[in-house]
Amino acid sequence: MDRKTKGSSLTATGVEHGFTLIEVLITVLILTIGLLGTAGLTMGIIRGNFFSKNITSATAIAQTQLDAVQREGYANTNTTTFPSSAQPVTMGGMSFSRTTTITPNSPAANMKTVAVTVNWNEANNAARSVTLQTIVAQ
């Protein structure tokens, strides 16, 4: 006799249908662990994107300065035109410090090596920097 009684989850054989409380709790625990892992990965991705944005901004700042050096040419590439002291630059809501170093007669006579270093501090106070170099010849 395999008939169901109205309003009951028991069959004529006495087997119950559904989930026990322990099964539900274990499922919730597994889902919670998975979601916490996903949240941790998301935070790592956000930090990585922020770091990449800062590297890109610092490289753009340094490249802009090197382009200005190239436009000025050999004769005007000096510490008067491009001061060697740190210059503050803000880009993308972040503050950077740009330093231009000009080394005359390097690597050979009638050549100048120009290095632009851009420094900044990350949110965790880690100091970062990007340095680009070019050589200007007479």
Image (tube, helix red, strand yellow):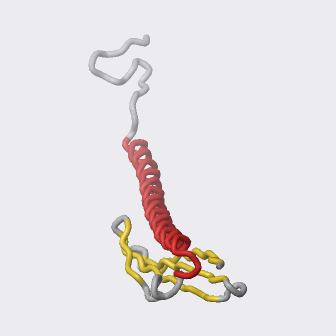
Q: Quadrant of the N terminus?
A: top left
Out of 8 and 63, give the one closest to the viewer. 63
Residue at 62% of width from left, 82% of height from top? 113
Q: Is residue 81 above or below residue 67?
A: below
Tell me which corner region of the image, top left, top right, bottom left or bottom right, holds residue 50.
bottom left
Q: Is residue 43 above or below residue 77?
A: above
For residue 106, side relative to residue 10 (left or right): right
Residue at 38% of width from left, 80% of height from top? 88
Tell me which corner region of the image, top left, top right, bottom left or bottom right, holds residue 17.
top left
Out of 98 and 93, give the one closest to the viewer. 98
Q: Quadrant of the C terminus?
A: bottom right
Out of 3 and 138, give the one closest to the viewer. 138
Residue at 40% of width from left, 47% of height from top? 28
Residue 134 coordinates in the image, percent (x, y): 62, 75
Residue 8 coordinates in the image, percent (x, y): 30, 22
Out of 118 and 37, give the one closest to the viewer. 118
Residue at 58% of width from left, 74% of height from top? 132
Residue 19 coordinates in the image, percent (x, y): 40, 35
Q: Is residue 31 above or below residue 82?
A: above
Residue 73 coordinates in the image, percent (x, y): 56, 75
